[in-house]
Image (tube, rainbow, N blue to C red):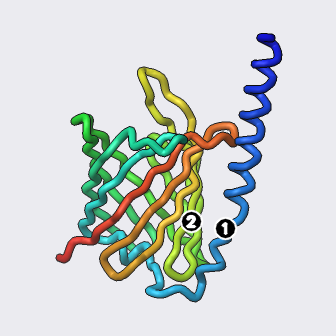
Amino acid sequence: MNHFKRLRRLLLVVATGVATLSGCANQDITQYAAERPALDLASYFNGKLVAHGIFQDRSGKVVQRFTVDMEGRWNGTQGVLDEHFTYSDGRKERRVWRLTQHPDGRYSGTADDVVGTANGQTAGNAFYWTYTLNLPVDGKVYEVRFDDWMYLMDGRVMLNRATMSKFGVRLGEVTLSFYKQTP
């Protein structure tokens, strides 16, 4: 009977992974090409911003709330986005993205806790990028994939939804609302 339960769990994990991968494959950045206002990352992420976010586990339960104070600076096609996270439990964290704008709306980025290079593209009001993040949890560090979608709502507000996964299995979602400060 134990063997049957393990097999059933394995099949459930595989089915969940297949469903997750199928869901990710449906969205294509080019479908947003006509959406307005057009997103220019170098313009939007230039200056001070604040974001409010939540992390939901795969059941949908909110397990973490946080605020991010950011400042972006660009010099031509090179940008730096300095993020300061404050979590609801009082924990603080910092991530500094080093971004490069490429032709045709493509971007790449690196940060100290990102494995390799993040790659993405803009089209219309949307930005999609993927990266692997070293995520510390309970004293251990896990490499977790992020599929990150951002949508510019107007000149000041952008919404962000990111799906976190490992080995193709969905772990949860991060939802953020960005607000660009006026100079």
Q: Are marks 1 and 2 in contact (CB under 8 Å)?
A: yes
From the image, tell me which residue sits under label 1. Answer: 27
Between discs 1 and 2, the one toward the N terminus: 1
* Residue depth check, mark 1 versus mark 2: number of the one nearer the observer: 1
Alpha carbon distance from label 1 to label 2 = 10 Å
| Residue positioned 55% across, 74% down in the render | 122
- Give the residue at x 22% y 36%: 90
Displayed quadrant of residue 86: top left
Q: Tell me the quadrant of the picture where the C terminus can be found.
A: bottom left
Q: In the structure shown, which secondary structural element does the residue marked by tag 1 occupy? A: loop
Q: Position of residue 37 (x, y in %)?
A: 44, 86
State whether residue 183 is above or below residue 68: below
Residue type beneath disc 1: Gln
Packing grade of label 2 (10 A; few <14, some 14-19, many >=20) is many
Residue drawn at x 39%, y 43% as measured from the top left: 62
Q: Label 2, on which residue?
A: 128
Between residues 69 and 116, which one lies in front from this camera angle?
Answer: 69
Q: Residue furthest top?
A: 2
Where residue 61 sits in the image (x, y, percent)? 44, 42
| Res 181 → quadrant | bottom left
Give the position of the N terminus as an image quadrant: top right
Which residue of the protein is positioned furthest toward the front in this rendering? 1
At 42% from the left edge and 21% from the top edge, which residue is drawn? 139
Which amino acid is tagged 2? Tyr
Image coordinates for residue 26, horizontal then vertical, percent:
71, 65
Q: Residue furthest left?
A: 183
**Left or right relative to 122: residue 159:** left
What kind of element bears circle 2?
strand
